[in-house]
Image (spheres, grey):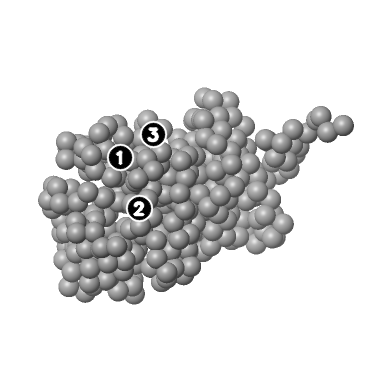
Amino acid sequence: MTEQQPVAVLGGGSFGTAAANLLAENGHQVRQWMRDPQQAEAMRSVRENPRYLKGIKIHPGVEPVTDLLQTLQGCDLIFVALPSSALRTVLAEHAERLAGKLLVSLTKGIEAQTFKLMSEILAEIAPQARIGVLSGPNLAREVAEHALTATVIASTDEELCQRVQAALHGRTFRVYASADRFGVELGGALKNVYAIIAGMAAALGMGENTKSMLITRALAEMTRFAVSQGANPMTFLGLAGVGDLIVTCSSAKSRNYQVGYALGEGLSLDEAVNRLGEVAEGVNTLKVLKVKAEELQVYMPLVAGLHAILFEGRTLAQVIESLMRAEPKTDVDFIPTSGFD
């Protein structure tokens, strides 16, 4: 189904570019907006995004643009792939243009000052817009290279879910629907923190048992926190929970994993982030999550441990030792351990 109206993708990063290509391959005209005119010009002439997705040809149906107002006016379906730190500033001045639009957030992050998820910022800026979240185990390069991939579109707006499924669903990309926007989005944001720990563990040569323990305890910790905030625990058994956690914690292609790996090799946090050359949302998320968990009194030992390593001068070995000394709790929080007689 080809829509007459073009589809907008806001953001010139790796995932925005991969999403724009997918949409174009499905027959849509795509306007990919970016702030940097030089980047847009380079992408137009070379038909590649050399900084963020080197070696991937940009589909002829993708037009890199720099006029945000024109892009918002001309498109009804808008995918937002801006960094979490830029989303509010970029869109706030265009609030009135967003009324009635379908806004789908692709950004997995949390706003530092407010602890708001990206879809909550969109809802605040544009209360008249229709809002959804796309999240799942979706490494940008693999999506762009057509590795078989599945994702989740989450919204209570059923028609929005159907529109996004129709727009993105293709030969190598499956789109499932969920009504738990909050849980799906929280899963996407929280897992970035644990990917840093997994990268460190890999650099330090820790065993497969250890990695498995870290991933599983991370899932328990994420779910515990999300449920305290009103999310459905079952969401975390799906693609946006355990699915995304597995890929981010076990792939060297994951940006947050790369930061953790560099830390495990002995680099400082600044050096690790500079080596990556782009945003690793997990570092920002960690800071706000630590404060929020303490405020809500949610038990998150891995978050506290990683915070101690990055900002309080502790080593991973010290943190793991204290985790191993802690009182063992039940394995899965949402299964009663009593009453089986």
In the shown orientation, is residue 191 left or right of residue 94? right
Q: Residues within 10 Å of mark 1 (few under 14, many from 20)?
A: many
Closer to the chain start, of discs 2 and 3, is 3
Residue linked to disc 1: 130
Q: Where does the image place residue 67, in percent across and percent down from the top left?
A: 13, 53
Front residue (pair 111, 224): 224
Question: Can you say whether 272 is above or below 52 in the image?
Answer: above
Q: Where does the image place residue 98, in percent across and percent down from the top left?
A: 21, 40
Q: Amino acid at mark 2?
A: Val
Q: Are marks 1 and 2 in contact (CB under 8 Å)?
A: no
- The structure residue drawn at horizontal position 53% and vertical position 52%, both measured from the top left corner, is 239
Dot 1 falls on a residue whose secondary structure is strand
Q: Amino acid at mark 3?
A: Lys
Q: Where does the image place residue 125, in percent across and percent down from the top left?
A: 26, 34
> Which quadrant holds residue 127?
top left
Front residue (pair 73, 2): 2
Residue linked to disc 2: 164
Q: Which mark is residue 116?
A: 3
Dot 2 falls on a residue whose secondary structure is helix
